[in-house]
Amino acid sequence: MNSLIRSILLAGLGTAVASAALADGQARFKTADPSLPSLMFSWQTAERSRLDTPNETAHVLAIDGRAWGVAKVAGHPVSMDLDQLAKLLGQHTALARLGPDAVVPSQITSLEATGQRETVAGVDGERYRVSWVDSEGNARIDEAVLTDDPLVREMQDALLGGMTRAIASGTGVSGHEAAEQELTRRGLAVLRFGDDFRLESISDARQPDARFAMPSQPLDLQQLMRGVMGN
């Protein structure tokens, strides 16, 4: 199972509540993938966000509905289509695992509040028993901690409305809309989902424009490799 893309999508299922005054912010969350202990997500608006993976020389930008990979190639920072960047970096990198083989939530069949409280990343939430169906039709049950905290909801508006949809469009991963709509209807956001996702920190710190800048015009992979090889 593709833990990275599943974790991103599970995080993004919190809510799609529109926010006319979405604040800047930054959040760190933990995944179940031992090779990818945490991810850093930064945003300015729902249409302008960035995802960083630890110990990688690349990051993902979601700008106006499209996802771009940024990495150093032959010592120079370049940007390109996310799928092309994953292929260039190789199958063992985190970005390469953002692909169409991911198993993602496609439907929530039940969401039962337990009445138990849990604090995650300093945010109060309630534990829920979640029954859901993945994109391969398998029934699953997990425990989730959900909240209506405004900042967490803003984070997930950017993660869902910007980054998740842009990655889904660029990699072919989709099918989570029904689950998204159920949590949207309830006005809830995810603090923890099973062992796949756990919010570690979140702040409304202002994010500089430079953090979301493309270092170059997006390059075509074949053109890039021809240049590296000197052809």
Image (spheres, rainbow, N blue to C red):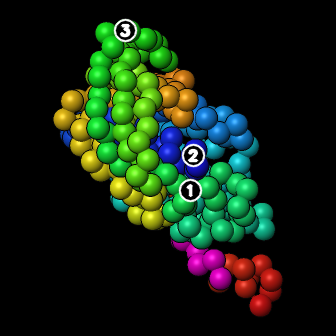
Residue at image mark 3 = 116
The residue stretch that appears in magenta: 215-222
Residue 217 is inside the magenta segment? yes
The answer to which of 47 and 180 lies nearer the viewer is 180
The amino acid type, in three-letter code, at marker 2 is: Leu
Residue at image mark 1 = 98
Identify the mark nearer the N-term, 2 or 1: 2
Give the answer, above or below, for where 146 lies relative to 178: above
- Say left or right for 101 vs 75: left
The answer to which of 13 and 150 lies nearer the viewer is 13
Residue at image mark 2 = 4
Residue positioned 60% across, 70% down in the render: 84
- Crowd band around label 2 with a 10 angstrom C-alpha radius: few (<14), some (14–19), many (20+): many
Circle number at residue 66: none
- Is residue 38 in sight in this rendering? yes
Disc 2 element: helix
Disc 3 element: strand
The Cα atoms of the two marked residues, 2 and 3, are separated by 28 Å
- Name the spot of residue 124 as percent of width and height, x first: 38, 12
- Name the spot of residue 21 as percent of width and height, x first: 24, 36
The amino acid type, in three-letter code, at marker 3 is: Gln
